[in-house]
Amino acid sequence: MKPQDIVILLKKTTFKGQNLSCRGLAESLGMSASSVSESLERCRNAKLLDRNKKRVNTLALHEFLCHGIMYVFPAEIGRVIRGIPTYTSASPIKEQITDNGECYVWRYVQGTARGHQITPLYTSVPEAVLNDNELYQLLVIVDTLRMGGVREKNIAIEELTKRMNQYAENK
């Protein structure tokens, strides 16, 4: 598994059963079609996609995100930069956490916030979420699972569970 595999799986879940081509995924995520194709094969081998590479196994993805992502792809906090808010600085987590004055962002030159840098799962994530709020919120939840404390992770698990249940119903 590679970090971009998670981004691709999350993007596929937001399409609610619609088949999105490798080229469509690549364009929407700022990746090459060949890297998306390789990623889908890795995800199929990991049983996170069906054998036709069309449907996400939302139960397995949920389990991996809740219990494994923090070990496989831990988040790193860097210096203060300009970017797009994530972690406890963005919805749907920020509404449920008392603001401690800290802001966390993915590096993005045209970003509107200043805060501690968190390395996204893939370099194109900040641009990929600009026009996809659903993907943005999922990646905020994943960042919370990657680096949050017990309270933050419990909130993220609750939010992820709601979304994965909706996606599973719409298959």
Image (cartoon, helix red, strand yellow):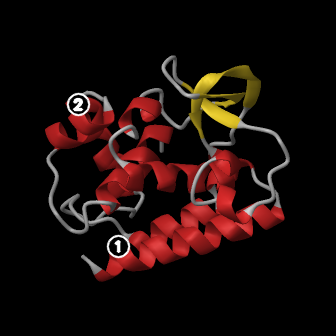
Residue 131 x, y percent position in the rendering: 33, 41
Q: Position of residue 72 (x, y in %)?
A: 64, 46
Please tell me whether residue 157 is drawn above or below residue 106 in the rendered image. below
User: Furthest residue to the top?
Assistant: 109
Q: Would you say 38 lies left or right of 146 here?
A: left
Residue 59 showing in the rendered view? no
- The reply to whether dot 2 and dot 1 touch (C-beta < 8 Å) is no
Farthest residue toward the bottom? 169
From the image, tell me which residue sits under label 1. Answer: 167
Vertical side of 134 occupied by 56: above or below: below
Q: Secondary structure at mark 2?
A: helix
Residue 153 on image: x %, y %: 72, 63
Residue 34 bears which disc, if any? 2
Q: Residue at x 43, y 39 (%)?
A: 4
What is the spatial separation of the Cα atoms under label 2 and label 1, in whole angstroms? 26 Å
- x, y percentage for residue 74? 69, 42
The residue type indicated by label 1 comes to: Tyr
Q: Residue at the spot x=39%, y=62% of the render?
A: 48
Q: Answer yes or no: is residue 88 visible.
A: yes
171 and 79: which one is in front? 79
Q: Quadrant of the C terminus?
A: bottom left
Q: Which comes before the other along the chain, label 2 or label 1?
A: 2
Q: Residues within 10 Å of mark 1 (few under 14, many from 20)?
A: some
Q: Kindly identify the amino acid type of the residue bearing the numbered disc 2.
A: Ser
Callout 1 secondary element: helix
